[in-house]
Image (cartoon, rainbow, N blue to C red):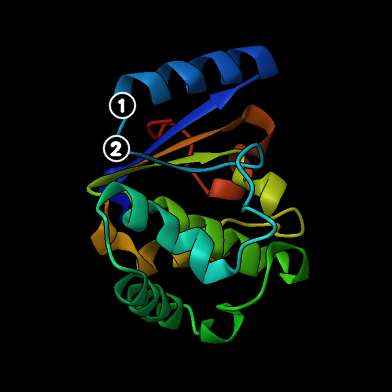
Amino acid sequence: IDRKVHLAFFDREGELQRTLKEFIVTHQPRVGLVSPDAPLISNLSVWSNIALIRQYHQNMPVHQAKALTERLLRRFAMESIAERRNPSLTMEERFCAMLLRAVMVEDAILVLDRPFIILADRRSGRFLTDALRKVDDLIAEIHVFDYSWEKDRYEVPDGAEA
């Protein structure tokens, strides 16, 4: 998974937002976004949120999209949340649902925008790394945009590409 991860850290909010927007515009339609600014649709179930991309962009039938979503939730041992809605999810469940929604984009360039805002109680990036490994086969590249003061959570050695 490390071969695909590109980290970008910023000292200022404006710089992060500007760079993120430019990246998204440049790489559409392959961007799959996980961001606190792109929450799950609250009146839809988890499986519906995840399946939406395939249903609308690839005209996937509902039953097929639901079956795909259930298989992907199984990778996280989270099949039980398929019918739940955003407000009833834990932060880990919410993050995984957002991640699965993002990787539904074909040949996904996954963009993680300040993931520790979503995973606020997590001290290290281990949960994040483990989650990404579970969907590695669906991701072409991973780009992380975060604040410089969060760098230690990613366990990036000094001198490594960031």
Rendered location of residue 90, percent (x, y): 73, 69
Q: How many marks?
A: 2
Between 133 and 64, the residue placed more toward the observer is 64
When asked about the image quadrant of residue 133, the answer is bottom left
Q: Residue at x 69, y 32 (%)?
A: 149
Callout 1, which amino acid? His
* Left or right relative to 162: residue 39: right
Rendered location of residue 128, percent (x, y): 53, 59
- SS of the residue at dot 1? helix
Between 104 and 157, the residue placed more toward the observer is 104
Which mark is drawn over residue 27?
A: 1
Which mark is drawn over residue 30?
A: 2
79 w.r.t. 41: above or below: below
* Left or right relative to 37: residue 52: left
86 w.r.t. 58: above or below: below
Rendered location of residue 65, percent (x, y): 34, 69
Q: CA distance from mark 1 to mark 2?
A: 6 Å
- SS of the residue at dot 2? loop
Give the quarter of the figure containing the C terminus.
Answer: top left
20 w.r.t. 84: above or below: above
Q: Residue 136: tell me if it is visible.
A: yes
Q: Residue at x 61, y 62 (%)?
A: 44
Q: Residue 12: tell me if it is visible.
A: no
* Left or right relative to 31: residue 153: right
